[in-house]
Structures are given as C-alpha cells and as structure tokens.
Amino acid sequence: MTAKSAAAAARATVYGHPRQGPNRELKKAVEGYWKGRVGANDLHRTAAALRRSTWRQLADAGLHEVPTGDFSYYDHVLDTTVMVGAIPARHRAAVEADALDGYFAMARGTQEVAPLEMTKWFDTNYHYLVPELGPDTVFAADSAKQVGELREALALGLTARPVLVGPVTYLLLAKPAPGVAPGFDPLTLLDRLLPVYAEVLADLRAAGAAWVQLDEPALVQDRSPAELNAAARAYRELGALTDRPKLLVASYFDRLGEALPVLAKAPVEGLALDFTGPAAAHLDALAAVGGLPGKRLVAGVVDGRNIWINDLERSLSVLGTLLGLADRVDVAASCSLLHVPLDASAEPDIAPQIARWLAFARQKTDEIVTLARGLAHGTHAIAAELAANRADLASRAASPLTRDPSVRARTDAVTAADTRRSAPYAERTLAQRARLNLPPLPTTTIGSFPQTGELRTARADLRAGRIGAAEYERRIEAEVREVIAFQEKAGIDVLVHGEPERGDMVQYFAERLTGYLATRHGWVQSYGTRYVRPPILAGDISRPEPMTVRWTTYAQSLTARPVKGMLTGPVTMLAWSFVRDDQPLADTARQVALALREEVNDLEAAGTSVIQVDEPALRETLPLRAADRPGYLAWATEAFRLTTGGVLPGTQIHTHMCYAEFGDIVQAIDDLDADVISLEAARSHMHIARELADHGYPREAGPGVYDIHSPRVPSAAEAAALLRKGLEAIPAERLWVNPDCGLKTRAWPEVRASLENLVTAAREIREDLPTGGS
C-alpha cells in the first residue's frame, strides 16, 4: 500500500474508556450490591447499559472501531485471572458457589479469606490485583465475559475489537503464590498459558471478532534476553494459529526499546505504539527496524494520561512521517482513556477560556477523529479545527496563570543547604525520643479516619450554601473530638485529627494553592469503586495562607498525646494531579515543595512535634526505564527534603508510602532522610521489612499490619504474627505499628475493631521484649 492509500485508509480508535459512567453509576451499583441494596441482575443491567452508552457515544463521535472487554466491575487484570482460570486455591470455593461474589472476594477479601495483593499499574495511579501463580497452577479458558461483551457491541451494528491483557504481560505482572518456594518465576508458565489464549482467540473469532488487541505494556520496561525470547516465542506461536482473528499487539506508557524488533518481526498483523512523551522515540526506532511492511500501525499520538489539548499540527506531522513505515496507519490515544476524566464540558467552575485548553476522554476522542480525518483527506478538511487549536495553544502559552515571577525567583534561590536537616539522624532521634517519650513499638495511624455520610453531606451543604462556614467548622470540630477520643480510649500513642475536612489528600491542598484548578466531575478510577478527582496543575504554585494548622492545633488542644500534622508531599501532589506539560517536572516539584515547606514550618511553630509528609506516589512515578530513573529520583528526593529540611532536630518527620513495589526505590527511601516511614506490608506479608533490612535502612519504620483496602477485621493474633515477622528484620527500637494506609474508605465499626486489635497486638509483643513493655 502506498503512503497515499495508507492515509486514505486511516481510521480512528481507542484502546479503552472510563468505566464509571457520567455520574459514577457503576460505583453506586457495585457498592449497592456489596451492601445488599442492589441485586445481581440489576448490577448486570446497569453495567450493560453503561457499555452500550459508551460504545454508541464513541461511534457517534466518529470512531471506526470501538474496544470491548476493557469494561470491568473491579479490575481488568483480575478479569484476566478469571479468563485464564488462575483462581487462587483459597478463593475457589467462593467462585464455584457464586462467580460474582467469588470475584469480589478475590478483590476485597472476606472475613475468612484474604484478597489478592494490590499494586500500581506501571507508573499510573490505577491499582490492579496481582495474579498469584505457582508451579502447580492449572489454567483453563473462560471467555464468557470477552465473548459476551463483543456480541453486545456487534448487536448494535458496531465494528468492535476485543482488548485483552497479553500473556507475557500477565505473567510478568504475576507473583509466586503464598507458600511457593522462593525463586519461582511465573514466566515459566508461558507454554502452559498460550493454549488458553489460543482457545479464547478462537472463541472470539467464532463470535465475530475480526481483530483482537493484546496489550503488552510490560515490554516497555527493561527486559532480559530470556524475557524477550519468551515474548518472541509467545507471538510466534499465537501468530501461527489458524483459528484466530487478526492480532494487534499494543504497548504504551513508554518506548519499547529492544522489544520493538521482537514485535516488528512477529507474525501478527498489527502493532499499536505510543508516540507521546519518551515514547516519541518510536518514530526513529521504527525507521531503524525497517518499519512495519504489510502491517497495521495504530499510532497513539494523543496523550491518554494527561488532560491538555493536543497540538494537532505536530501530531499530523508525526502521522505523516509514519505513513511510509506501515501498510496502514490508524490514529488513537497513547493508552486507554481509563486514566482521564470523562468530559471537560461538564466543568462549570472552570473559566471557558481555560476549559478550551483541556481535553478529557470525550474531547480526546474528538481529537483522534479529527486527526484521522486530516490524515485521510488532508489538512484542508480540518482547517477550522486546526485554526481553533492554534488559538487555544497560544492562549495557554501567553496566560498570566502559567507564570508568576515571584514564585520563579524563590525557586531559583534554593540552595543545597535548604534540602538538609540541621542535624544527622543519630542526634535527631535522641532529641525526638526525649520529647515524645513513646513506648517500644509505638502505635499510630496513617492519617485519615472514615469519611462518613455526615461529613460528605456537610461539605455538600457548605458548597451549596445551605450552611455557613461557622456551622461547617462546628461539624468538623465535633468529628475531630470523636476521632481523638476514640484513639485515646483505644490506646494509640501518636494521634491524628482524622482529616474530616479533606475530601481528598491532594485536592484539599490544591484548592488552597495558587496555580491549581479543581474539577467538579473529573473522576478517575484508582481501584475498584474508589474514584479520585485529580486537580489540574496549570500554573506556578504558591501558598497564600496556612492550610492545616487550624485543625492540627485544635486536635492537639484536646489531648496530651502528640498529634501528627498531616501533609501530602510534593511528588504525590504531582503524581495525583494532571501536571503541566510546558516545563520540567523537577521545576514544578520545587515550587510545590517550597509552598509545603512554609506549611511545615508553621506547624512546627504552632507546637506540632510530629509532622507526616506523605509520598505514596514516589515509587509510582518512577520511570519505567532504568536509564531514566536516576534523574527522577534526584529531583524527587530533593523536593521532599526541601519540604522538610527547615525543622528543628526534635521535630519528628514521618512519611508514608503504599501499594507499590518498594524494592526498586529503597535507596531513595533512605535518601528522603525522614525519621519514620510507614509502608504497606499486610498483603505482601512484610516483604518490605526484609528489603529495608537488606539495604541497611538506619531509621524507624512502620510496615503495615492492617490491610485497609479490605473489609476484613484482622484479629489481634494476625496483627501480632505480622509484627513478629517485622521484628525479624527491624529491631524493636525502630519498629512502629500502624495500618497499611489511611482509613477514609472504611466504616467506623471495622476501624474501631481493627485498631483495637492492632493496639492489643502491640502491647502483647511489648511484654515479650527482653526489656519488658511500658
């Protein structure tokens, strides 16, 4: 096919779409099912209606091919575990008794059975359920979900392409099941898994699929020769099947590197590649491997992870270059649109001119369709869209919102001394222990307490003008009093105020800093039914006034025990926002750090003795390629130290991280120079404690003993068992006792029972210490 005919054939598609519905209908239906208010049939009807609505909207917008199979009640990796029959032994009875309840038991656990481990999906804030595999794992195909959703789309008269997690990525994401001997590599199960994928592909072909997309994002990471050979073997075998649809192998989030020639040579009919950010290197890399003659290329030129409008002329230039490198070039977003909100036009609080800079899922779909039309029919066919796009890009570049000279002057004045504490840890810990007088194995929580319906109602009433600020503060004070009273009664050593005034740990601060925009409906799935509204980091950052001092000092006035000040760290403020793309992330992080430093210093001046600066996203934002990591970790750890470096030795700095693979960043955790770090550890069975010990981590740590993402109430014996496991790696004088993460998503009955058991476990083990408890 010539470049001209390839352009004429250009079509528009996406890899996936937000699942929740415009009013989070899916979240409400699933949570209603969990609470017994919604029946299974009603839940399935709600889900089917959402799928139909999404597909029709995508087709009406001009997409030529819609994705199926990307919809999920909880997580698409968990759906893959069901598809290949890799149900953990502890969940099989539940799945056999009721498939839907068993599915949710794997995701959330029950009082009797622990859930699957959960961690971050590459470098995003989406969480997936980690497959548990072992040498005895037996796979069995179950294509009912994938076939059913394909048939739904085809029945609407649409061209549909099922999307599956690819077999190599699935195995690379998996972990050895509990009890499996150390050293087991799930990738050794590839030959056992491929026949299952072959059966699913045959079922989809029989159901009418012309193409099937197999997502292999794990191949954009650094991979060993053995792993690359496994990928080559997988697609050689799948490509050789006779009873299958055409195969489109997709990667995203970064460049394929050494995996590109592997996939380019594979006997598959198409590749889908990311051409945004660092993955823009694919343009030259494709030419270097001789292009994709005879294959379909789906070019992800619209950023699927951020919310800024596309530079249409630049994207058209990339697409034009690609025409000579493939038999057919189609246009898509760089990844699934799962990672952006649904519709920017639903944001009445954002000024219309600024709103024109934004593209959520629906606007990105329009951009993709426009680019496909321009590629197929020439720029004259989209002249009006190009002119409007140029004007909007120019408006953003010239806006005073994006540049504050005073902020930039402060940032330029930062020195290395600003990023160092005034005393080394050995001196600080003596001062802190004298000031705080805590027992061995001190107990604390991560910060938030349950966000009750009453709290959400109070915030809604304040926004709607039904109550004034004074009444709102009265309600928050009452909640703080309840939280402090419970913690004192339960016997917790270092208290928190519970954060009742905060709907979200990032948005709360974003609304109080200049340069941020907040959305009303910009929901994005984090995990399961947990949705967040990432704020938009649009301009230079400063702090007009204190943000947390009022509530921390009020809580401290209610108790003689120390109350932690609670802040969200600079890297997490970036990672859980939609960041600006017009300056380096390091510059933005430094601006945020300086604003937070002011807050830390004000908390200390108000008498706060313990200040926690949460950085759960430090690992999440780690670049996928090792070569890119040193630069990132240098500015990320510097930003944390800039936030905390101004306090006195006797002020104890905590940080917190959760649901990530920490082994890759143990040195960075050390480089933060926090006095205490709390980490997720319950689902991973204290693995991080051993990693810290192996590194020689010299400061205090609290690996979590209570999995807060499950409704289970861990017994005191369970918590004690985990603590003893932690003590095998971390000495008692440096070990803290805490949950995995904040408690805002849990209900009060669970929280009360779980924390009481946590304190009981700590006291029991204190009594067993050589010096006795206190």
Image (cartoon, rainbow, N blue to C red):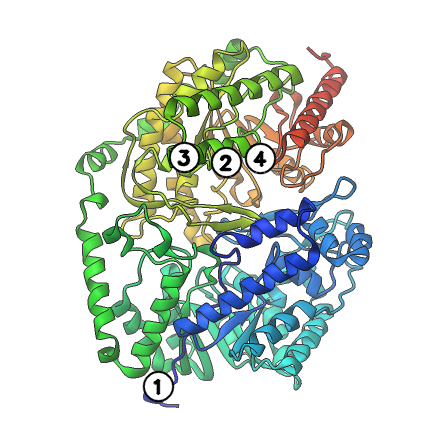
300 w.r.t. 743: above or below: below
The residues tagged by marks 2 and 3 sit, at their Cα atoms, a distance apart of 25 Å
Q: Which residue is mark 1?
A: 8
Q: Helix, strand, or loop for circle 2?
A: helix
Q: Which residue is mark 2?
A: 669
Tag in front: 4 or 2:
4
Say the numbered circle drawn on residue 741.
4
622 w.r.t. 702: above or below: below
Give, as a three-letter code, the residue at label 1.
Ala
Q: Position of residue 78 (x, y in %)?
A: 65, 57
Q: Are marks 2 and 3 in contact (CB under 8 Å)?
A: no
Ranked by sequence position, the earlier of labels 4 and 1 is 1
**Residue at the front extreme?**
466
Q: Mark 1 Cα within 10 Å, few/some/many (few <14, many 20+)?
A: some
Residue at x 45% of width, y 29% of height:
501
Ranked by sequence position, the earlier of labels 3 and 4 is 3
Number of marks in the image? 4
Tag in front: 3 or 4:
3
Q: Which residue is mark 3?
A: 508
Q: Helix, strand, or loop for circle 4?
A: loop
Query: In this view of the protein, which residue sits in the foreground, 606 or 473?
Result: 473
The residues tagged by marks 4 and 1 sit, at their Cα atoms, a distance apart of 52 Å
Q: Are marks 3 and 1 in contact (CB under 8 Å)?
A: no
Say the numbered circle drawn on residue 83.
none
Give, as a three-letter code, the residue at label 2.
Ile
Q: Helix, strand, or loop for circle 1?
A: helix
Q: Which quadrant is the N terminus positioned in?
A: bottom left
